[in-house]
Amino acid sequence: MMSKDSKFDWDLTENMASSTATEPFRFVHVSKSVYQRRGQQNCMIQIHDVSSSIMIDYLQTEKELYEIINATVSHEMRNPINSMVYQNENILFVLNQVVAMLS
């Protein structure tokens, strides 16, 4: 039987493999549960590696940021380029009309 008062959760960042700098840090979720069994109070600690889900969240956020940057830069670059193209077309049109009038 598990007591609600005795259960708590917390998150830790911990290097699970070794303390060398070559090993990546791992994200773990640690939960502790205290329960009664056969008249004895027992403690159970569970450690779950949640590194992959944190990495997925990080990559999704990074992808969204790149999409926003790409949309903004594309829009800001497209407008001036279109403006220059239309200005060049107008200059060509006026130049052709002037040449036609002088001929």
Image: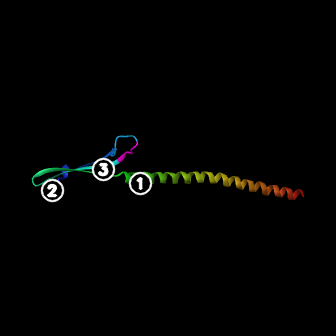
- 71 relative position to 28: left or right: right
Residue 14 % position (x, y)? 33, 44
Dominant secondary structure of the magenta stretch? Answer: loop
Q: Which residue is mark 2?
A: 1
Q: Quadrant of residue 18?
A: top left
Task: Tell me residue 85's x, y (percent).
Answer: 71, 55
Q: Secondary structure at mark 2?
A: loop
**Residue type (three-letter) at the residue carrying disc 1:** Ile
Place of residue 44 in the rendered image (x, y in percent of width and height, measured from the top left): 20, 51
Residue 39 as seen in the image, left or right of residue 56 = left
Pointer 3 residue: 29
Q: List the residue tagged with mark 1.
A: 56
Q: Nearer the viewer, residue 100 or 44?
A: 44
Q: Whole-Å distance between the Cαs marked 3 and 2?
A: 23 Å
Quarter of the rendering containing residue 92: bottom right
- Dot 2 amino acid type: Met
Location of residue 94 by image quarter: bottom right
Residue span colored magenta: 22-26
